[in-house]
Amino acid sequence: MNEQTQTGSENGGFSIGAKSFLISLGVIFALMVAAFVLAITVPGGQYARIVNEAGNTVIDTAGGFTSVQGGIPFWKWILSPFLVLGAQGNSLLIAIIAFLLVIGGAFTALDRCGLLKYMLLTIANKFGASRYKLMAVVTFFFMAMGSLAGSFEECVPLVPIVVSLAVALGWDAVTGFAMCLLSAGCGFAAGVMNPFSVGVAQKLAGLPMFSGVWYRAVAFVLIYALLFFVIYRHAKKVERPVADYETEYVYDAKKSRALGAFAGILCVGLLVVISSTFLTFLQDYTMIIIAVMFLVAGVVSTLLTGETVPGLCKAFGKGVLGMLPAILMILMASSIKFILEEAKVLDTILHAAIEKAGTLPGWAVILFVYLLVLVMNFFVASGSAKAFMIVPLIVPLAGVFNIPAQLCVMAYAFGDGFSNVFYPTNAALLLGLNLCGIGYGTWVKWSWKFQLCNLILTSGLLLLGLAIGYC
């Protein structure tokens, strides 16, 4: 882990590490090239689409699939990272970029005034003797946020805090990242009451929203147990004494008040995110709400430490500039879906997969659905957007083999969630990794074993669900 992640840079800023940036940039560019090759070699195709009663555009299974002219001009491929900003349905991408700028500015300001380090020393001093209990609680909290409120991108601003906390408690950046964003991704996939994957998929499948919750709750517990075991085992390997951090802590009344204000404002934001599970009109605005809360929390708490307004503005501006490399990576990663959609290739890939599923034995179809969603999630990261594309096709297909629609929804949630914290095409993953100086290659090397074990566990849950008639 670099020095910037532990205590901020020497100049008081949080910026993207050069090495991790170049590695991630290379991986994404290679994927852009691969997408261009697919765009000019795979025949174009298109499913008929209709607008349902809820006003959402979904695939019309009666309309069928037709071949169309595909391909993409070279100039459009070159400019795709910028053209993607004007593409339909990319308001989330713009929100993530704005989100990122706020994070960079707020955390640089917190670092400049010393509040971030004070917060970490306070927590390390209080929980240093029971740090593994704290690990269990933090991991459970982020899994619950993902599973109950559908939070994933919204957890990105907390990554630097949790990673720095992990370092302060004697672990490393990977431990902190796993406690935060990996946990949120696992909870998102377990989907106990996730409105963005399970909720949307159940509506499209004609099921009562959040029905079948008991089996998803069982899955949540088993996935949490596996995740905590993996994080705990890694932390034990890298742990170091925290006595040095404990002796550094000195109570500061002014910073304690500022820290209380910071925590209080963020708690309000988190409560709003959690309430969006029930107040559905808030679901389109959760990222905006969290961004505003972080902006307000950063400004208010920084000023409460005694920092001047000019100093705050200078630090905030420096943090915004430090995030520009991450914005470039996010645009490049998002362009992969844009390239394939422009070339009319995504529907062709989906159609070929659905035809293949029809040749499989019944028990294997549910695993094929899982695999299909995993593949499509590489290109389409949005859970709700992917649901409108896939669910209207997989539910009727599964019905032919007497596979319950509820189990299809579970397979969809698994395929949508876990790979979010593995695929380099996921903007939130790239952003989180670069905020804490972890190279994408380093993350893959550490997390692939967990992903494999989790794949085996969740495949077993799907087969068991099929055997017991989960519906």
Image (cartoon, rainbow, N blue to C red):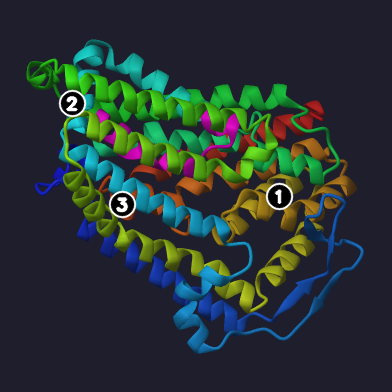
Q: Is residue 371 among what the camera can see?
A: yes
Magenta-drawn segment: 145-169
Label whose residue precedes the other's in the sequence (3 or 1): 1
SS for callout 3: helix
Question: Disc 2, disc 3: CB below 8 Å?
Answer: no
Q: Which residue is mark 3?
A: 434
Could you tell me what secondary structure mostly forms the magenta stretch? helix
**Residue type (three-letter) at the residue carrying disc 3:** Asn
Circle 2 or circle 3, nearest the eye: 2
Task: Judge from the rendering whether residue 151 lies leftward or rightward of residue 30; answer left or right.
Answer: right
Q: Which residue is mark 2?
A: 118
Residue 306: x, y in percent? 16, 31
Residue 384: x, y in percent? 67, 49
| Label placed on residue 30 | none
Tell me the crowding category of disc 2: few under 14, some 14 to 19, or many 20 or more residues within 10 angstroms, Cα based.
many
- Residue 380 in magenta? no
